[in-house]
Amino acid sequence: MNSHNILRDKSLALKVAKYINERCSRDKYTIMHVCGTHEYTITHFGIRSLIPKVDLRAGPGCPVCVASPVNIDLAVKLSLMDNVLVTTFGDMFKVRGSKFSLMDSKGMGGRVSIVYSIHDAVELARRNPDLEVVHFAIGFETTAPSTAAMILSNPPENFSIIPTHLLIPPAMLHLLNLGEVRIDGFICPGHVSTIIGVKPYLGIACSKRVPMVIAGFEPLDVLIGVAMLIDMINNGECTVKNEYTRAVRFEGNVKALEFMDKVFKVSDAYWRGIGFIPNSGLELRDEFSMFDARVKFDVNVEADYNMPPGCRCGDVLRGLIMPWECPLFAKVCTPENPVGPCMVSFEGSCSIAYKYGGFTFH
Amino acid sequence: MCLAVPAKILIIHNDKAIADFGGVQREIIITLVKNDVKENDYVLVHAGFAIQKIDEHSFKDIVNTWRTLLEH
């Protein structure tokens, strides 16, 4: 595949940027995306500097950043119990709950393993029948089908999960309902959309009168996505278009959606920095409750959490401010010593801005 | 977190496959795309699972459309 070279074609990128700039008939167009990988592409390739009238805002596109601190506290507590091993994806390892992260727990003698895939966690459970293996099942719609597939694959009895999967379209609707930031258009997350397809966005785009484009993750994907959005905004076209056709079908991944539906039911969920969002979480259906670590282990954690003093991750996650507008950014809060979750995760807006921000394309 | 990378399927064995990630080969789970893919197809892989087949030609269509549009 040579998509990389073609989708990073500098001369075509500059032409698309010119196309966008020529069509910006007002001072500012605010376009929000809700994906950490989009934020990486936008910041790493200096896309904001190419299209100065387009205010590209990052929304809550990092599941690690918005993960419920109560679930992290639960994972920490379980990892410190005898005969329990907690497995986690790498970017969740360092994120603190109310006090501690899984990394802190490991330092305190807790049993924690980083896995690449939930499949590896199930294999660990099979190979260690004397251990209870608890997987921290985090992620948006991109990740939830793999959790569902493993739950349906008849995993061993000593395997369970802490269900922390979240759904993106309800969060987009919530931000529009909050109305804290003007959103002229959305770039929809490409990999979430490979699973859910185009349909879940359509109702929101029509009812809230907000154009949306599903875009891929190369620089030209994002620029073409923005160009499509600017045309849609100018024409008052409130629908959903798909730029990422190489991976996103209208109907999504039907089999993955069936798996999710079999295993999970939709529930209200708490998003760190945002609060409770209706119908934005996934809980295991009753027939799979034996795989729910919260049911399996009689452990209580306090649902009491505030962002660290001075930390504005909540405002970053709701698109109210850019990372560098937080007074702690790059002063007391750095990837080495992160204060808030957005500086911890590789896909957090603050971490990306710290590592790659400030690049201007000439 | 939702990072997904393209890989070429080399050998399929039931719900698993050996896939090539630009020179590095590793096992992936293809349960979610099983009926849609065959050997030599490209898929997007996220957290060890193939989540969707990649249509190699469609990105060229989009780029060519924009190239044509911008050259006139």
Image: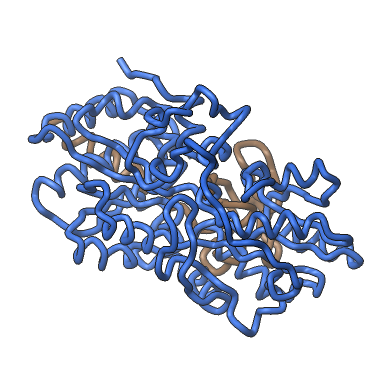
Chain colours: A blue, B brown
Residue A155 in the image: state x and y as whole percent. Answer: 75, 72
Residue A290 in the image: state x and y as whole percent. Answer: 72, 78
Q: Residue furthest top?
A: A362
Residue A62 visible in the displayed image: yes
Residue nearer the viewer, A308 or A9: A308
User: Is residue A302 rendered to the left or right of residue A4?
Assistant: right
Residue nearer the viewer, A290 or A215: A290
In this rendering, the answer to whether A331 lies above or below A66 is above
Q: Which residue is located at x 66 percent, y 79 percent?
A: A289
Which quarter of the image is occupied by the C terminus of chain B?
top left
Q: Which residue is located at x 76 percent, y 71 percent?
A: A297
User: Is residue A191 rendered to the left or right of residue A64?
Assistant: left
Q: Residue furthest right?
A: A130
User: Is residue A258 rendered to the left or right of residue B67?
Assistant: right
The quarter of the picture where residue A204 lies is bottom left
Residue nearer the viewer, A248 or A35: A35
Residue A287 in the image: state x and y as whole percent. Answer: 64, 84
User: Is residue A207 rendered to the left or right of residue B20?
Assistant: left
Q: Residue furthest bottom?
A: A287
Residue A60 in the image: state x and y as whole percent. Answer: 42, 49
Q: Which residue is located at x 77 percent, y 47 percent?
A: A105
